[in-house]
Amino acid sequence: MLDSAQIIEYIGFLAAAITGVALIPQAHQIWKSQNFHCISIFVYSLFTAGAATWLLYGILIHKWPLILSNSLSLLLAGSILTLKIRSESNR
């Protein structure tokens, strides 16, 4: 039988999986099409900074769901942001 702490941890991992996977379709579409017109540098800058901050927080409190989900979010959002910035500078 699972205790409440284990259930809470599993919910955290489920949330991590959902949020981590959420950016994959958009990142894939952007990489495949090389179309960055609909991407906002401001929004992705904020999102990337938020993911980095959540990752730091997860590391500081030693919570793997936060570490895993925000590592993936930071990687994907940071990649999209970098590609967007490069596309803007090539104009």
Image (tube, grey):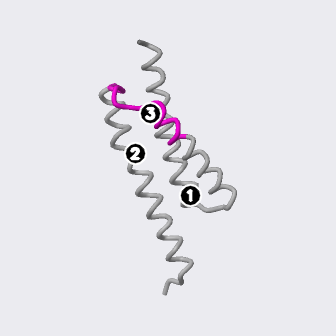
Placement of the C terminus among the 4 image quadrants = top left
Mark 3 — residue?
Answer: 80
Count of numbered marks: 3
Q: Is residue 47 magenta?
A: yes
Q: Closer to the N terminus: mark 3 or mark 1?
A: 1
- Whether 34 is drawn above or below 53: the answer is above
Q: Closer to the N terminus: mark 3 or mark 2?
A: 2
Res. 66 mark: 1
Which residue is located at x 58 percent, y 55 percent?
Answer: 67
Residue 17: give x, y in percent of width and height: 43, 58
**Extreme-right residue of the structure:** 60
Q: Give the extent of the magenta segment.
A: 34-48
Mark 2 — residue?
Answer: 23
The residues bearing labels 3 and 1 have C-alpha atoms spaced at a distance of 21 Å
The amino acid sitting under disc 2 is Leu
Which residue is located at x 56 percent, y 57 percent?
Answer: 66
Q: Are marks 3 and 1 in contact (CB under 8 Å)?
A: no
Residue 13: give x, y in percent of width and height: 49, 64
Secondary structure of residue under mark 3 = helix
The amino acid sitting under disc 3 is Ile
Secondary structure of residue under mark 1 = helix
- Label 2 neighbour load within 10 Å: few <14, some 14-19, many 20+: some
The residues bearing labels 3 and 2 have C-alpha atoms spaced at a distance of 10 Å
Q: Are marks 2 and 1 in contact (CB under 8 Å)?
A: no
**Extreme-top residue of the structure:** 91
